[in-house]
Image (cartoon, rainbow, N blue to C red):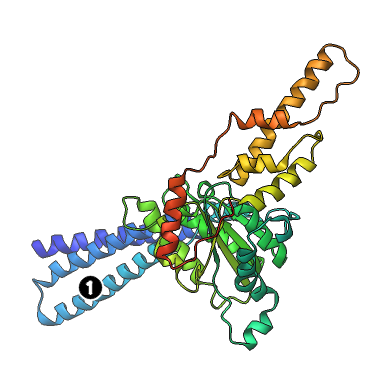
Amino acid sequence: MYQKESYDLYLSKLREAMTVDEAAGEARKKGARDQAADEYAKASVLYAQAANSLLDVCDGCNEGERKDFEKSVERLTAIARQVRACAEELRRQPSQQDIQAEEEDQVLFRPAEAQNVTFDDIAGLDEAKQMILDEIIHPSMYRELYDRFKMDNSGGLLLFGPPGGGKTMIARAVAAEANLPFFSARCSDIVGKYFGEAEKHVRALFEAARKAKNAVIFLDEAEALACRRGGHSTVMNRLVPELLSQMDGFEKFDGRIIVIFATNRPYDIDPAFLRHGRLPSHCYVPLPDENVRTAFLKKMIAQRPCSDDVDIGKIVQATNRFSCADLVNLVRKSCQYPINRSIERKAKGEQTVEEFLCQQDIEQALSRLHPSVEPEEIERLEKWMKKMGMQLPQMAA
């Protein structure tokens, strides 16, 4: 009786498995990938259950029957594995939605419009600019010369320094000097709200650059994207290996992708990024010294209507520890005063309402501003430089 019940159960499971298997095939033909995968997985379980029921039948059979049933059990088990493999393969294949999402991701990362920014537009930093030329730009422009001298031209650039120092401008100048497309991304462009989205965005960014063959990838706020592993953030613990993998993928790439990281906190970057072949070149972008502030302010003020009493030297002395961003803000705040005077005169009905930027306007704006970078930040950066064996810059003021 037990043998008959087991045999009937075997037949029932086998029929159900074959029906579900056939339905999975139909779903697959229609392109219903997820439905087909679910049906194949269900059929796999049913084939396995049929095999188990047939094993129970074997217990009450003679030796000859048992061998026949055991062969059938082996075939059913193989079918169950094969059908399960079909389900797993379908689940690995990207759906139409996945393909569309990937295409949308790649659209997110397009090269920025060309900007006429060169090293000539960047005041000072002569040693840093020469280092970038030697290690980053010239290997792309004169590849045959570097190959002749067996010079390895792989690896990217780490730009670090206090905020507002012009790291983004330098990165754009690198792209312009090497005449390469410029792909830029921040942490907010990479990290999404869904599982696995950050890794997918990193792959899309690097794939977009590879399609250009030669390009610059600029990652701002790098300390957020390439932070030290081992913390509680599962996103970053997955993102960092993906980013490392993408950077290592250039060794056999027929082209040149220059990866540039910019950060205010280089000590928070995972050390794996700083080795040779990834980011071997480290460039400190300090606060502007006296000479740089002079050139920067002259250029900015010359672009605006100003009176003859503007004393650039006096302003430079009063802006020690100001970053480039602080200087831009100073000029912007200063210009608001002559604008307001012009508006007031126009409101009174005066015909001539032209006003000019004067020394008093700048000093008044200066009285309300202070450097945005604290000395402690500079000390921490210099401590990291010493640890890395780098030479500290000699600041004029």
Locate the N terminus and report the quarter of the image it occupies. Answer: bottom left
Q: Position of residue 95 (x, y in %)?
A: 51, 56
Tell me the amino acid under the disc marked 1. Val
Q: Is residue 117 left or right of residue 245?
A: right
User: In this picture, is 217 found above or below 366?
Assistant: below
- Identified at 57% across, 50% down, the residue is 287
Q: Is residue 183 left or right of residue 88?
A: right
- Identified at 41% across, 58% down, the residue is 383
Question: Which residue of the protein is positioned furthest toward the right in this rendering?
Answer: 351
User: In this picture, is 364 found above or below 89?
Assistant: above
- Labels in figure, total: 1
Q: Secondary structure at mark 1?
A: helix
Residue neighbourhood size for the residue with mark 1, other residues' Cα within 10 Å, grouped as few (<14), some (14–19), many (≥20): many
Which of 303 and 370 lies nearest the eye of the viewer?
A: 370
Residue 285 visible somewhere in the drawing: yes
Question: Which residue of the protein is positioned furthest toward the top in this rendering?
Answer: 348
- Identified at 58% across, 87% down, the residue is 150
Which of 138 and 234 lies nearest the eye of the viewer?
A: 138
Q: Position of residue 319 (x, y in %)?
A: 61, 41
Q: Position of residue 46 (x, y in %)?
A: 28, 60
Residue designated by label 1: 73
